[in-house]
Image: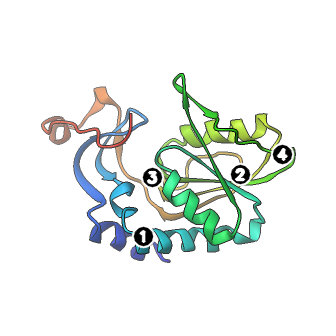
Amino acid sequence: MTTAEALQLFRETGALLEGHFVLRSGLHSRQYFQCALALQQMPIVEKFGRALADKTRSLGAATVISPAMGGLVIGQEVARQLGVRFIFVEKEEGKLALRRGFKIAPGEKILVVEDVITKGGRVQETIDIVRANQGSVLGVAMMVDRSDGTVNLGVPIFSLIKMNVETFEADKLPPDLAAIPAMKPGSK
């Protein structure tokens, strides 16, 4: 799947939004990838999942792990396409944690899958959890890399869309963006 094809799927599903958005990172942006809108259609999930699985298959992951909520649907589909186990981390007392009886074996080869990253904070938390449980992080795969490849997570990164989406600090908004009420469409 090319970047243009992936962007077209986002546009067709109404998942690429324009306006004034506050991202999970706290940064403000004119564009927002609402992956949940694209991932509500199983044929689209299958296409995105297959594309990410094809990019990461050679890593030889035994398990896919995703941060909840955003990474759950795409992470599970990538795991299905790879024929491997799927687990996830979720918030517990404000921080991501491995729960629900999920275990990581020492040396277990793990691929982290997320929907979108800007700064990579939740993915880094997930990597830290895998390493704290003695797992081996082989790489990170995502549908959208909003950093245009500038985020360094210390492992190989794979994305379907890599672009520099302009972001702004809350106190440094350009006048046109400041004039539009901010929306926070993602999870909190």
- Decide which of tag 2 and tag 4 comes sooner along the chain: 4
**Helix, strand or loop at mark 2:** loop
The mark found on residue 155 in the picture is 2
- State whether residue 13 is above or below residue 149: below
Q: Residue 167 in the image: x percent, y percent? A: 36, 43
Q: Amino acid at mark 1?
A: Met
Are the two marked residues, 2 and 1, in contact with CB atoms closer than 8 angstroms? no
- Decide which of tag 3 and tag 4 comes sooner along the chain: 4
Are the two marked residues, 1 and 3, in contact with CB atoms closer than 8 angstroms? no
Colour scheme employed for the rendering of this structure: rainbow
Are the two marked residues, 2 and 3, in contact with CB atoms closer than 8 angstroms? no
- Decide which of tag 2 and tag 1 comes sooner along the chain: 1
Q: Residue 78 in the image: x percent, y percent? A: 59, 65
Q: Which residue is under mark 3? A: 146
Q: Amino acid at mark 4?
A: Ala
Q: Amino acid at mark 3?
A: Arg
Q: Which residue is under mark 4? A: 105
Residue 28 horizontal side relative to residue 133, left or right = left
